Image (cartoon, rainbow, N blue to C red):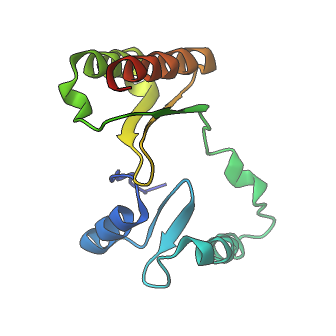
Amino acid sequence: MGGRLIRTQVGDRYVVEKMVKGGYNLGGGAVGAHHLPWTTTPPATGILSALMLLAARWPRKNARLSDLAGIITDFPQVLKNVRVGRRVVLSEVPKIASAIDEAERRLGEKGRVLVRYSGTENKVRVMIEGEDQALITGLATGIAETIEKELV
């Protein structure tokens, strides 16, 4: 449909920063969307997103919003939170780096691995998306257990 996916670090400030630098007008994440220049605060964007979606579909006669659902492939997602006693650079802990690399290798282009520290808690967040629920659950559990062994 002519759109591009551009990834940023997790967090509204990074999304908005990338949008401003790139001249983009739509961005977002799991908790909300951003519409520049109208708003950058997710609580206001739910209503704005709905209105923009309706405006895009309105000119087409007999167009149903449910038709849009068919163009989205929804992958299962697993999120594990691991409380840690210390923060280190995760890629510098060989066993953790190896577990993450193995998960990325096994998923290939059919999924995504995101391992990061929480911005507000002493936790590491392990998020994996992919086609196969059993596979991503196993990979996320393996990474989480490795982090627990190495950092708790």
Q: Which residue lies furthest to the right in this view?
A: 62
Pick the residue in front: 120 or 28. Answer: 120
Q: Where is residue 53, by image quadrant? A: bottom right
Q: Where is residue 72, by image quadrant? A: top right
Pick the residue in front: 101 or 84. Answer: 84
Pick the residue in front: 53 or 130. Answer: 130
Vertical placement of residue 139 versus 85, above or below: above
Residue 127 in view: no
Residue 145 in view: yes
Residue 64 x, y percent position in the rendering: 79, 60
- Location of the C terminus (image quadrant): top left
Q: Where is residue 51, by image quadrant? A: bottom right
Pick the residue in front: 7 or 93. Answer: 93
Residue 41 x, y percent position in the rendering: 51, 76
Please indicate whether residue 35 sits to the left or right of residue 5 in the image. right
Q: Residue at x 22, y 23 (%)?
A: 93
Q: Residue furthest bottom?
A: 38
